[in-house]
Amino acid sequence: MVYLDHNATTPVRSEVLRTVREAMTEYWGNPSSTHSLGRKAFACLETARERLASILGASSRELFFTSGGTESDNLAILGIADQWGDGNIVISAIEHAAVHDAAYSLKAKGFEIREIPVDENGIIAPESALERVDDKTRLVSVMYANNEIGSVEPIREVGEKLASRGVPFHCDAVQAFGKVPVDVRLENVSLLSISSHKIYGPKGCGALYARSGTSFRPRTFGGGQERNMRTGTQNLPAILGFVSAAELAMKTLEADALRINDLTEMMFQKISDKIENVIRNGHPRRKIPGTLSICIPGAETESLLASLDQEGICASGGAACSSGSVGASRTLLAIGRRKVDAICTVRFSIGRNNTVDEINTAVDVLEKVTNRIRQANL
Ligand code: PLP
């Protein structure tokens, strides 16, 4: 099998697995318990929070552990909006469903949702974000890097401008954290979401950074954990695994990025040599390492993915496709792809364990299945 779907999820690193196993046997106490086992777990939890905070350039009081990117995004958007009866929320046109759908759920409560368009490479213009902000704007949310096409947004510039206007700024950094350096102070964000399973950590774990002074309301009520903002007994083994994965990612970030970028460019080169009329999606330079999204006109995503899978290649389509529906992805339409091309898109996302041989195999298989599907469609 060749796994080329690392933007969907990643395998747990062996060092992380050891950490999780150790946590499950040694630190299984409830961090809220006052006895020695609980205190031991609590100490571990708080040390992990400090370690993660130091990676992000945050203070540990600004970090809230959650069940992952989706919950962090929801907590940020709904938690901010909950403080207001109405107003508007500004998001980019290519947000992940965890942001997009959370924002649109607020329409029923009387909020207006304003979308910032992207250019043909999937990048927003900071001015165009600002143009949509007025005194009824409750939050602006722009993703750091897009999950489908990999483009990296001008977060720092938008953050700077919004800070001077006092508007809270949320960033979904789920696809960026662990792949490119992310520092919350430099990026000028008020809130930032990250997830463990995209960086070789366990699933069902993530964090929300909320700059001190940023006020938002909780979505859960109970025992008061995470300073009341995300109550419920913390999943300490997953949290320790997440933080260990984050530290490992920082250590190998540059070397991984170089190698993964090389593999990605090599893959695209080989694909364009072997397959006619492929269209690459995303910005040529402003991008996270490893994402390769291409439209292969005449070969529908569903057929491509099923045929690739039969030959042992794991890849992905657009976001809509991954949830079982066949519609064209919002992201691809937003960058100006025609619907007929958008529904013929495959996303390969390369990770730290992939090899040149695997890429060669995947390209050979892609060539074969593309020819077959295109022939059948003639
Ligand atoms: N945001 C982005 C950009 C993502 O790519 C994903 C996952 O695909 C999420 C949010 C959701 O994260 P999680 O799977 O941890 O809930």
Image: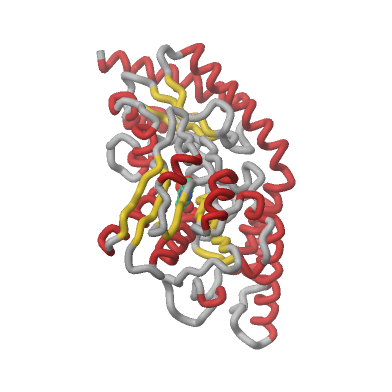
User: Residue 113: percent from the left, percent from the top?
Assistant: 33, 52
- Residue 315 point in image, percent of width and height: 45, 34
Q: Is residue 33 visible?
A: yes
Q: Nearer the viewer, residue 345 or 55?
A: 55
Q: Is residue 154 above or below residue 220?
A: above
Q: Quadrant of the C terminus?
A: top left
**Is 122 in front, or is 113?**
113
Residue depicted at 28% across the width and 37% down the height: 326
66 left or right, relative to 307: right
- For image coordinates 50% across by 21% down, the residue present is 363
* Residue 290 percent coordinates (x, y): 57, 34
Q: Residue at x 44, y 31 (%)?
A: 119
* Residue 245 visible at all: no
The colour scheme used to paint the residues is secondary structure
The structure residue drawn at horizontal position 46% and vertical position 46%, both measured from the top left corner, is 130
Q: Quadrant of residue 337?
A: top left
Residue 174: where, in percent of width, then height? 53, 49
